[in-house]
Image (cartoon, rainbow, N blue to C red):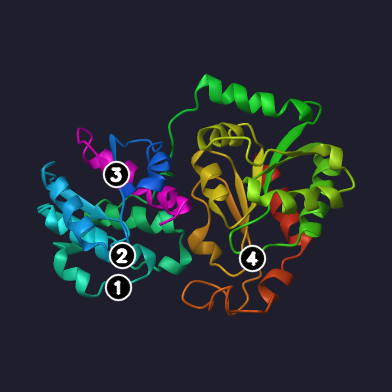
Amino acid sequence: MHLGDIFMSASVIPVLRQQYPEAEIHYLVKDDLAGAAGLLSGIDRIIPYTYKSGGYMDVYRIGKQLAKEQYDLGISLDPRERVTLMKWFARIPIRLSMERALGWELGWEKYFYTEDLHFRKPWDYREHSMSESFQRLIRDYFRDDSEEFIPPTVRPSTKAELDKAEALLVPLQGYKEKIAFSVETTTKTKDWPTRKFAEVADWLVETYGAGIVITGIPSQEPRIAEVIRQMKHPEAALDVAGKTSLTELIALFRRMKLLLTLDTGSAHIAAVAGCPVITIFTHNSPEIYRAACAVSRTVSGHVPCSGKHTCIGPSRCTKTDCVDCISTDMVKTEIQQVMKEL
């Protein structure tokens, strides 16, 4: 459904590659996410689809198109009604549902799968990242008891993409470290205050000699400008919002020491690029939604009403407890720990 979902659920791919090294793996995905899915390592072909709400003829049409491919195995990472029926219409002989990795139980959809996967050993999805739960579930299907987590990855950046990243960073060439920020989400009302981002940015400049690279999309420019305006060292901040394509952003993250971000797609883009990530969580579950990479840390106040299946949603909640309880010292502590590890 979202960019982050593409990268978090991609943890099944390295396990599939281990089990079926000669297989051809196709990824069926909404057309607006096809570009992102096409970057994933281990995917041979992307099949984009368009779907309108209530468009059951679209579902039937796509299912019949898939039938021509004569697939041996179909895996539904998020088995919603439409993908469930698509695979059934495609008459794929083995159809697996992975709904339990998301903490849900299937309803009527379970009758359209040959197997609704379950964890063979005790596993609480609330204590693991979504990527870990997906990978554990597919390992259990193959009776693979390995405990190693293999993070999903994307293809290497091209020279042109890396050159673009280097060109963008020229204004910060005098700074020892380059640290990226992502300061706004689509939620907005639960975003961490700009003044706190500015305080952490100044501390990074003064403590580590860091230059701050603020990423984002053009609509986030007002908030980015507010962060920079409140900094004591605005000359150390570089606004690159809207100046990169997705692949160029991945290349840029490959040049960063780390990313400090809110709970947004940037966290997962940086993760597949191999960039260390520190994610600030307000109303969402840090255990479930943390980025899938070797160095992934989270900051959360863990208020009782936050988390999956608990939070009533930012659009319905006027309280700011989950935002207010996250201090700059909490964020600085996590940064210090990561900087010691790197």
- Which residue extends farthest right? 232
> Which stretch did the figure color magenta?
1-28
Q: Which callout, 3 or 2, points to the residue nearer the camera?
A: 3
Q: Whole-percent x and y of residue 16?
A: 27, 43
For label 1, the residue is 105
Mark 2 or mark 4, whichever is nearer to me = 2
Instruction: Quadrant for residue 69, please give it.
Output: top left
For label 4, the SS is loop
Q: Which numbered dot is residue 99?
A: 2
Q: Nearer the viewer, residue 293 or 317?
A: 317
Residue tagged 3: 27
Lower position in the chain sequence, tag 1 or tag 3 = 3
Check disc 2 and give the amino acid type.
Glu
Where does the N terminus fall, quadrant-wise? bottom left
Q: Earlier in the sequence, mark 4 or mark 3?
A: 3
Image coordinates of residue 331 in percent, x first then y, are 72, 57
Q: Is residue 24 magenta?
A: yes
Q: Residues within 10 Å of mark 3 (few under 14, many from 20)?
A: some
- For the question of whether residue 142 can be seen, the reply is no
Residue 85 screen position, x and y as percent: 19, 61
Cα distance between the residues tagged 4 and 3: 34 Å
Q: Earlier in the sequence, mark 2 or mark 4?
A: 2
Question: Residue at the spot x=60%, y=47% of the render?
Answer: 277
For disc 1, the neighbor class at 10 Å (few under 14, some 14 to 19, many from 20) is few
